[in-house]
Image: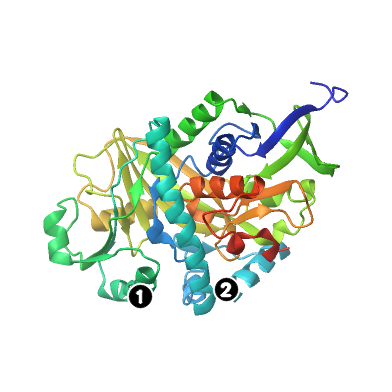
Amino acid sequence: MNAAAPALSADCLIIGAGVSGLATALALLEAGRSVTVIDANTVGSGASHGNCGTLTPSHAPPLAGPGTLWRAARWMFTPDAPLYIKPSLDPLRLGWFLGFARRCNAKDYRASAQAKSLLLEDSRRRIQDWVSRYGLCCEFAETGEDYVFRTRRALDHELRDLPLLRELGIAVEIVDGAAFEASDPAFRSGVVGAMRFRGDAALRPDRYVAELARVVRERGGHILESCPLLGLTEEGRGVRVQTAQGAFSARDAILATGAWTPKIAAAVGLRWLRKAIQPGKGYSITYSRPTQLPKRPSILFEPSVCVTSWSDGYRLGSTMEFSGFDASLNPRRLAALERGARAFLHEPVGPQERERWCGWRPMSRDDVPLIGRAPGHAHLWLAVGHGMMGVGMSAGTGQLLADLLCDRAPTVDPGPFDPARFA
């Protein structure tokens, strides 16, 4: 398509074919809207690809909380620490961290946890419903999840959140170390205890994203890959979107661009987004399955390593690195995943390594996503800033946006997710 060609017409144009964009597309199709999704790369090529695939209402407490700044400062010169902040004088990053630091208090911690809990639980139920109704072949299972500890100090520290978790309706079972080791022979001796969250679930993330794309297409949605956004302006009763494949006129546009949101903020007229979201780099290593696996997805707590598996694969993932848009694979941080697993598991890695991966999560200053109408715009909407919970919040995000766009009463209170809090 050349620059002089007439604009293509779309009802809802979704920018981003990751898990949030595709889930929003499906929810809008269910609501009777027609949908076109565009992506600069390919379906699911961002953070969804290397995700561990856990659906975890248990993870409602945010990264920003009492003690986070102390841990970050302590690990500042430890490049393979679970949380690593690379020193930088970039004013946008400094501004983001200042806003993040202001949230590291008990009051804001509780408020963010309450908001995340509602969306995670709503999304957990909706994903299960979608798996059933649409036959999503993504190895969904109601597995539960274990937080496993090797030091009493770490366990006692995490148990401080028990009252908050139970207040949020999250069922938690405390398992003694000896009982845990007896029940799960994949773990080495030395476990002091575990927190078991039976309400959590898991799926294979790449298959989930591919299946969302399949259902969107089957229900009449269009997906255009290799179609980067160049600019966006509001015109009359809609928007005009310039892309590498030509121009689109749409009634509504939804930005679901993940960690790339700060990069395109100026192109869509939302420069303030550059201060609201920073990329948080995560890592994972995928293997063929070892013979001895944990019985359920597990968080190896002290090294902050997530362990998940599916029918033909096994993954170690997690860590949080704030280093801007550095795309390099840091071998020290990858080695830390394997080292952490060796401290807990008899078979920490699989017999064949299949992929080493890193990707950026879109971290908002308060660790709560931005879902709703863009401030000052009538036809531009946001579904960004999901941090480490993009897969787990996907269906809930899509439904909340569909309700708002269609002027229906949402199941989840949209107030805590209103993008205007950052504008």
Q: Is 367 left or right of 297, judged from the image as shown? A: right
Q: Which quadrant of the figure contains the C terminus?
A: bottom right
Residue 109 position in % (x across, y down): 50, 72
Q: Which quadrant of the figure contains the N terminus?
A: top right
Residue 144 vs residue 314, the one in the foreground = 144
> How packed is label 2: few (under 14 Cα within 10 Å), some, or many (20 or more)?
many
Tell me which corner region of the image, top left, top right, bottom left or bottom right, holds residue 8. Answer: top right
Residue 225 position in % (x across, y down): 63, 28
Residue depicted at 38% across the width and 42% down the height: 128
Q: CA distance from mark 2 to mark 1?
A: 20 Å
Residue 330 appears in view: no
Residue 71 appears in view: yes
> How packed is label 1: few (under 14 Cα within 10 Å), some, or many (20 or more)?
few
Residue depicted at 13% across the width and 55% down the height: 183
Q: In terms of secondary structure, where does tag 1 sit? A: helix
Colour scheme of the picture? rainbow
Of the numbered discs 2 and 1, the one sitting upstream in the chain is 2
Q: In terms of secondary structure, where does tag 2 sit? A: loop
Between marks 2 and 1 in the image, the one whose residue lies nearer the viewer: 1
Residue 417 vs residue 154, the one in the foreground = 417
Amino acid bearing label 1? Pro
Disc 2 target residue: 103
Residue 381 position in % (x across, y down): 69, 48
Disc 1 target residue: 163
Question: CB under 8 Å between callouts 2 and 1?
Answer: no
Q: Is 371 left or right of 131, judged from the image as shown? A: right
Amino acid bearing label 2? Arg
Residue 95 vs residue 200, the one in the foreground = 200
Residue 359 position in % (x across, y down): 53, 46
